[in-house]
Amino acid sequence: MPELPDLEAIKAVLNSKIAGVKIVRVEMMQPLVIRQPDLKEFEAVCTGNRFIDVNRRGKFLLFNLESKHILAMHFMLTGRLQYCGTRENRKPKTCFIFHLEDGKQLRYFDSKLMGKIYLVEKGRFYTIPRWNEMGPDALDDDMTLDVFRSRIKPYSGQIKNVLLNDTFLTGIGNAYADEILFEAGIYPFWPGTSLSHEEVGALYNAMRSVLIKAVDTVSNRMRDDITTEVRDFLKVHRRGGKPCPACGGPISQVQANRRITSFCRNCQKA
Ligand SMILES: [Zn+2]
């Protein structure tokens, strides 16, 4: 699943490629991912419209259109974008293609077809299910340590699940939750309410530093290829059995709550 650093990198590439560019035609193959409005209206609004710029909130990429509509994309597990020329092979399960006036194409593909695409008028984000329940973005300027401390208080579940909870904050998924907890030296299955004042501070600092560094790394490595997922630099996530970069012991990997969690039993003591 694309997480905050992936989406930041994709956003930057798209802003350099499609800002100001007109959509001349929409080709629809798998309409299932278009949640709102109906297909006819989706195509009518997009055709002839122009991308102004691309923003992000949490795990949504937000495309501002000239008509003051916003195209909100949530990629879920397998949704991805491809920006390419017309001759490039289409990926399996390409759902729709924006044919652009400069001869390029912006394509959305999604092997599990779980992605969620919404087209809303400005100021009507609340029509997107659960939009208003979303917490602030993990890298929002307003997400200070004090705000982080007060927001985390009511969450009594395991700390990894708290980081993944979109009502607490948004942008962090399974991979970066593992990386942040490793950086902070916190056991992932510990109840959030059991963390000390110092541990909450360490968690906040780890969140900021891991995400900011990852935005930089992913952006540099992705270059213009927004279809690639750059994850090989992660320290623990999906590196079960490999040596911990801090202590050299084996990284543990467990399947819990229907997701994989990787951590070091030595550096993140229970
Ligand atoms: Zn270790």
Image (cartoon, grey):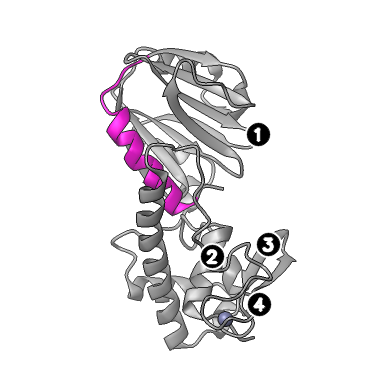
75 falls in the magenta region = no
Q: Give the numbered dot on residue 111.
A: 1
Tell me: residue 122, above or below residue 101: below
Q: Give the numbered dot on residue 177.
A: 2
Q: Amino acid at mark 1?
A: Ser
Q: CA distance from mark 1 to mark 3?
A: 20 Å
Please report the bounds of the magenta region as a residue range. 3-23
Q: Give the numbered dot on residue 260.
A: 3
Q: Give the numbered dot on residue 229.
A: none
Q: Are marks 2 and 3 in contact (CB under 8 Å)?
A: no
Q: Amino acid at mark 4?
A: Pro
SS under mark 3: strand
Label whose residue precedes the other's in the sequence (3 or 4):
4
6 falls in the magenta region = yes
Q: Which residue position is annotated with label 4?
A: 250
- Judged by depth in the image, the label closer to the viewer, 3 or 4, is 4
Secondary structure mostly seen in the magenta stretch: helix
Tell me: residue 253, above or below residue 166: below
Q: Amino acid at mark 2?
A: Ala
